[in-house]
Amino acid sequence: METRKRAFLKVIILGDSGVGKTSLMNQYVNRRFSNEYKATIGADFLTRDVTVDNKLVTLQIWDTAGQERFASLGVAFYRGADCCVLVYDVTAPNTMDSLDAWRNEFLEQADPLHHDEFPFVVIGNKTDIQAKSEKNSVTQSWCSGKGNVSYFETSAKNGSRVEEAFQTVAQKALEQDTELTKEAYPSPIQLPQDNNKSHEGCSC
Amino acid sequence: MKFTMNNPVHRQRILKCGWLRKQGGMVKTWHRRWFCLNGDCLFYFAKHDDLKPLGSIFLPGNRVDDQPFNPDEPEKFLFEVLPVDGNLSAPPVKGRIQTKMAPNHDSFLLCAESDDERQEWIRAIRKVMYSGIGGAIFGQSIAETMSFSRHNDLKVPVIIRDCIEFLTEYGLEIEGIFRLPGRSIMIKEYKAKYDTAERVVFDISNIDVHSVASLLKLYLRELPESIVPSSNYQRFMNIALRYQDAREAKQKQEALEDLIDGMRELPKHNYNILKYLCDFLHTVGEKSSINKMTTINLATVFGPNIIRNVTEADSPELMMATADLTQQLAFMLIHHKDEVFTMDYDGPTAVKTDLLIDIDSELPNTETLVPTPIRTSSNDLVKAIFQHLDDNIETEVFSENVENSVNFEQRNGKDGTERKFKEGKPIPPKRRTKNGRSSRRICNVYEKTPSGSSVSDDMEASSLTLSDVNNIDSLPQENIASSEDQNNDVSSHQLAMLVAQNKKLEKELEEKEKENKRMQWEIIEAKSKFELENSDLKSKYEAQIKKLMLNTDALRVNYERRIESMQTENKAKVEELESKLRTEMKDKKTAVDKVIELQDRINRYQLQYGELHK
């Protein structure tokens, strides 16, 4: 069954500039961290294969420019996403405040079937600088108030919890994908077993 | 709209019309009304074609604010026109300060259908209220802002001056200046201050560097036209493309010279703003060892704020697809600011030509730092570097990767700060395609999508036309639509591979095309040269031929004449000889006759006298 079709999952990373979106993606896909300080141009994607529930899936992770100018990436970039990762910087509280705006922007543009059920994963990044987020409880409550949202605190620099965070992303994306497939292709109509079986042979 | 449409005078002054809901003054019920912003007044009508308004709101001297989102009424986007508290400029009514808008309204509470619509109304109303006194600058054209400015001595809008002066004082050493976002509440507050023509003083104890930086970016972003106007969009983007594609320093220099030439086309105010901004950004870049904002980073951040196509608002894809070019352009403007900004609209010369600034900078660039005479010596280095870049398919032809390799001794002394340099050789550009994983900049995806071959084919190596870029619009949809079609993984892998392959081929094709083009040019040149020479020779020969012909003519005439004269001479001679011959013959005849006669006589004598000797 699993060899039939490997799931292909699209994930979008959003968040203010400088919170570490590119670094997170690089840490997860290439297991590398660069000290280079570089603003992202436009958008990039990387892919990584990952096993979820004994199924091999391909994650296509879209990294976006966090500049305000690029805040609205448009329908084309968001459409078909199976999960959205919202990143903020635990050392910069104002980046947490933007989560709402990024979430709304995504929902508005991507316009998934059920806004409240669409899977989000919130990541508070840079725990290597500040071990415990002051906003932890605030973020937690924000997440629980939004429905299908998980929360992780990571460090793209030392790799802490990055793997777990994206494992959850993959998990949620797969669930979303399966659900969508289910809705797109409703279960086939079961024809009632033919009673005529007993009537084998010619009826004439 | 009859009230307005039928009357041309009114029609001219109409700023905005539309349906809004208004809360009643006495009874707080909501009514749908047709609103018309006309001149200084906001009129409202029961129906949109009514002639007589139900009422009007005189705007100047009052203020307008949006009401915070109320979770109980999520569908209401409220804003309120209300008197300024203790407004001294409004005429006192009956000896007291005006606190009511109208006899039956303390204020006007209005409700729009959406937040966008609400912001549009607020902007339009603020324009009426404040633009005359130097406010309402967000979203207002540069020319208008400058004409209403209260600071006649300023060459740039006051908000730009304020922001840059503040940032020069406090921001140069802040990490991630212009990259990191400010606090949105703060930005909104100060935006409102500027829009309401309030006198703004940035105080470091009240506002942080990132908020001011974001405010400046927001102002630029909301301009109806970017600093580089849309009429110059095509030309400047082409220059950026050529600069990006340039393989040799010479081509880069050519593109740069084109840019310098292009600067003349900018309107005065736009030029001044750009110059002022790039001067400042250059200063920021010089401190990149502290603030981490290299010129590249600044260019990435400012590119789309400096130049954008008007239609980009509707097409984020276009913006994304051209992001690397806008970055390239911004880089050129900032990095080469001394070369690019050579004009000065006011005052004789304020242009800095001091190259030392560059040499000390954090971003020494091989091409520009070296003064022209020495440049030849560094050519090899440049070539080597670009050769290196060429080897990588996905490189940006940027010199960021190069920076560390060049002149680093010169930099070490600066600020006494030691920077770690990674060996003395160029650092290979970051490529994301490792281990067969695919990744590329989004613009490339769209340009090189197989299904979009028409787009990429149309994309000529050296000229990016707007229509081509616009085509990109349609592609992502197809792309993603197909990915929705559950043939996900295989097709996507194939797609990625195809894209990579296609890209490689395309690159080759591009090169070939370029070469082809160059050769065509050469042929054309040679041809024209040849033709020129040919026609030169032709005319020369023709002249000679003519001359010769004339000569021959002359000679012929001469000869003919001589022949004629000789003929006549000969004829005469012949006649003479003939006559001589004739006379001779005559003589002979007579002689013969005589001989015959004599013979006859002898015969007769012989008959008469016999033979003498017989």
Image: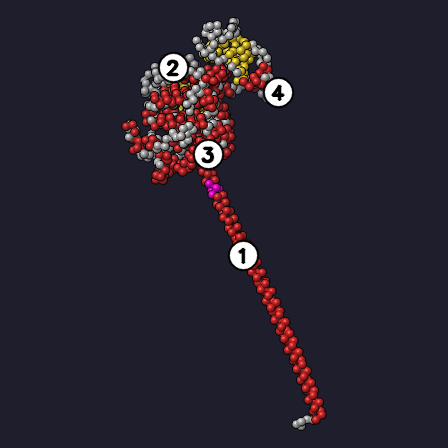
Q: Chain of mark 4?
A: A
**Residue at label 1?**
B548
Give the class, few, some or many, for how many residues have Cα within 10 Å of label 2's Cα (few <14, many ≥20). many
Looking at the image, is mark 4 or mark 1 nearer the viewer? 1
In space, the residues marked 4 and 3 are separated at their CA atoms by 64 Å
Q: Earlier in the sequence, mark 2 or mark 4?
A: 2
Q: Residue at x 41, y 16 (%)?
A: B199
| Local secondary structure at mark 4 | loop
**Residue at label 2?**
A139
Disc on res. A203:
4
Residue that sits furthest to the top in the current view = B27
Residue B262, given in percent of the width and then of the height, sits at: 45, 32
In space, the residues marked 3 and 2 are separated at their CA atoms by 45 Å
- Verify CB contact (< 8 Å) between mark 2 and mark 4: no
In space, the residues marked 4 and 1 are separated at their CA atoms by 118 Å
Disc on res. B502:
3
